[in-house]
Image (tube, helix red, strand yellow):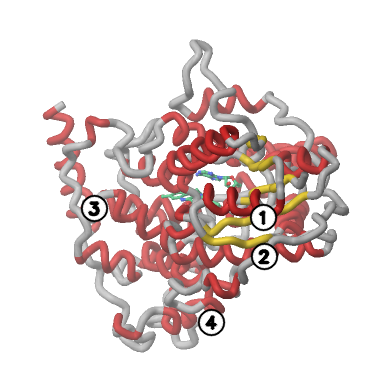
Amino acid sequence: RPVIVWFRRDLRLGDHAALRAALDTGQPVIPVFIHDETVEALGAAARWRLGKSVEALGKRLAARGSRLILRRGPALKVLTDLISETGAGAVHWQRTYDRDGIARDKAVKARLTQSGITAKSFPGALLHEPWQVQTGSGGPYRVYSPFWRTIRGLDPGAPLPAPSRIPAPQDWPRSEHLDDWRMGQALRRGEPVVAAHAVIGEDAARDRLERFIAERMARYPQDRDRPDLPGTSDLSENLAWGEISPRVIWHRTRAAIEEGDAAAAKGGEKFLSELAWRDFAWHLLYHAPDMDRRNWRPEWDGFPWRGDNDDAERWRRGITGEPFVDAAMRQMYVTGRMHNRARMIVASYLTKHLLTDWRVGLAWFADCLTDWDPASNAMGWQWVAGCGPDAAPYFRVFNPATQAEKFDPKGAYRRAWIAEGQKDPPETARSWFKAVPRSWGLSPDAPYPAPMIDLKAGRERALAAYAARKAGE
Ligand code: FAD
């Protein structure tokens, strides 16, 4: 009886425990991707990017004598239909650790098991399962440094090889067509704009890792904070859709550390410690499933953050008049990505200078990022806003102007994204004007907007609100 392998955000063949276990049964394998409510809930850029990843996986499977069956509908219904159509006796999948995903998977497992179908979930999205990493006294970690100290010495195990052939069933069940799903429909700026910046699929992710190790790793500790330099791996886009496993990154980097010189070792260690932030984010989300919607520290619940407002709209549009902030917001709109340092600056500007609720920013990131990940996004926003575990103290308000001097010293990043005032602006800066809706009424020939808010006044307003909250504690 065939085994169904249900792919979700794990769109790869290498290091895939659920697929490997299906192959080990010796039965035919039916790979499936389901367009269920979790796909409907994705932001525009993420949904488009997921579609590309699904397409790439379909091609990889076809090259191995297999197919990716596409179906739309609630997961349980689709799976039970497929089981009755194909006579499959088992369903395998790789675990997710977010609230909605866990609820769905639990219900599916219970119902399938009741009907005598083997339903098995496997690890693979993280270096370590969130319940396996525990503090000395037995609970979850809330602080990153001891979490890192613990997992730094833990071997996540050797990655599993990708299969060269996948046994096909005698008859394939019907598949829907990816084009009919119109995964890019909500991307109003047009697919080609974002597509020009995307690096899609398992092979491309491996190449990215190799390039990072060969060209960037030794300088990573110095360059990783510089949005004007190609200093980081850019792998978050591939990790988000499971095109590469963190375990592959871990092992390959460890090997490069062994083989390399002192600079490579230092860079590699730093890189792995950043990769561990991703595991930490999922660890937090697993243990605090509402982290994407509630302040992790309840004492922040009464904080006078403003809800959505006109200032936040200017922030979204990249016309605040604060060049570092606008450059970053424009970069994200066009490319679906934003440098980590810039994410921190724009998030701080929104939650502190504009005194706006972090959830307003989180939602816009979720709509724009091709590497959107519910755990890292929620942790990032709560970290900057000051209400998360192990958060930056609220009184540390990033000054976008001095941050720009430090991390974009020659202005290359700002010039790359802000056309106004430049005689011959680069294509990146112009592409943003072509991408934004006409209704925003923007032109590269108009003067660059004056700052929306005086940085000192914004900072003082934020600190006053914070002092009032502390006094009320
Ligand atoms: P590298 O520097 O090459 O790091 C390697 C890998 O380590 C990354 O791919 C990523 O998986 C992990 N990593 C590095 N830094 C972090 C971090 N601070 N938190 C979690 N993981 C990290 N990351 C996402 O993947 N998706 C998001 O939706 C997301 N939203 C964010 C929102 C805010 C407000 C902030 C401050 C950060 C957010 N991040 C998010 C984290 C971080 O900005 C990105 O992971 C990073 O920019 C990815 O670039 P890279 O792959 O070149 O990173």
Q: Secondary structure at mark 2?
A: loop
Quote the CA–CA distance across marks 1 and 4: 52 Å
358 with respect to 142 (left or right) = left
Q: Residue at x 84, y 49 (%)?
A: 163
Visible in this render: residue 295? yes
Label 3, on which residue? 356
Instruction: Report the amino acid beneath label 1.
Output: Glu
Label 4, on which residue? 427
Whether 51 is drawn above or below 12: the answer is: below
Q: Nearer the viewer, mark 1 or mark 2?
A: 1
Note whether ligand 1 is within 8 Å of mark 1: no
For marks 1 and 4, the one nearer the N-term is: 1
Q: Are dots 1 and 2 in contact, CB under 8 Å?
A: yes
Label 2, on which residue? 174
For marks 1 and 2, the one nearer the N-term is: 1
The crowd level at tag 1 (other Cα within 10 Å; few <14, some 14-19, many 20+) is few
Q: Nearer the viewer, mark 3 or mark 4?
A: 3
The crowd level at tag 3 (other Cα within 10 Å; few <14, some 14-19, many 20+) is many
Label 1, on which residue? 85
